[in-house]
Image: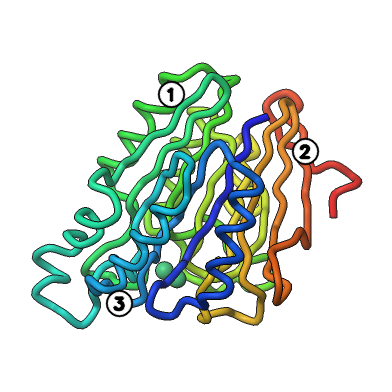
Amino acid sequence: MPVIAHISDLHFGTEDPAVAEGLLADLCEIQPALLVNSGDLTQRGRASQFIAARAFLDRIPFPQLTVPGNHDIPLYDVTRRFLAPLARYRRYIAKELCPMFQTEQLAVMGVNTARSFTWKNGRISLDQIEQIKSTFCAMPFPLFKVLVTHHPFVPPPDDPSPALVGRGGQAIDALDACGADLLLAGHLHRHYSADAKTHHVHIKRTILVAQAGTAISRRRRNEPNAYNLITLIPPEVEIQVRAWSGQKFEPIASTRYMKIENHWTRQPDSG
Ligand SMILES: [Fe+2]
Ligand SMILES: [Fe+2]
């Protein structure tokens, strides 16, 4: 039963230490097969913030797959922002900007969407779309295929205004053709799950989307600190939101989907 814990937007520099300890305790109890971290590990891309993020990640004894977010590129240090935007991220967090994790049932690919010029809004390049295609299209269809980005493909259900990842429409066509199942992202500090087809109406299949809130930062958007726990029990997948109660992380919502003829169908008893 592969379980992915999906955390995002740690924003070291604005972290709540009690919540950070609570998250570590919850993760150590759950023992996920993989920890996905969808970016914004730091608040301002400072060395001290990356060192704190690194020390936190070193205490998590599971495989990890991480992508950077816009806050991992220094905003005000313009020399570094344009000449070496992800140098500190690569030094302290991960050298690989297109990480992969694969088992017999599961393939997870990360793509960097953070950019120096459009600092807040992210983008996928044409080369990255080609890489998504060559990776996912070469894999057997029944494999559960997951793409991790920092910037979202689908807006929150109650707010169509946030900017989505640039060139997301083109990327989603490739993901559709190659049988991607799930898109994991953060950036908005809001948790929600959806079917990408509700926004990208032209795609042929359903592609699930799970957005994570901020796991430990005080930069909350009227929601508690939270993260996603994704459990794969083919042909079903459960996306559970675990939120900070003030004392511990506990489940606050759970949505189950079943794959029927390549379409993910939300199950009626979902929360
Ligand atoms: Fe963020
Ligand atoms: Fe962000």
Give the label on residue 44, or none: 3
Answer with left or right where residue 126 lies relative to residue 65.
left
Give the label on residue 137, or none: 1
The mark that comes first in sequence, 2 or 3, is 3
- What whole-number distance in Å separates the C-alpha atoms at marks 1 and 3? 37 Å
Quadrant observed for ligand 1 in the rendered image: bottom left
Q: Residues within 10 Å of mark 1 (few under 14, many from 20)?
A: some
Please say if the residues under marks 2 and 1 sit with CB atoms less than 8 Å apart: no
Q: Residue at position x 31%, y 34% from top? A: 131
Can you identify the residue that label 2 sits on?
A: 265
Please say if the residues under marks 2 and 3 sit with CB atoms less than 8 Å apart: no
Q: Nearer the viewer, residue 170 or 234?
A: 234
- Residue 191 vertical position relative to residue 210 in the rendered view, above or below: below
Q: Residues within 10 Å of mark 2 (few under 14, many from 20)?
A: some
* On-image quarter of the C terminus: bottom right
Which three-letter amino acid code belongs to the residue tagged 2? Thr
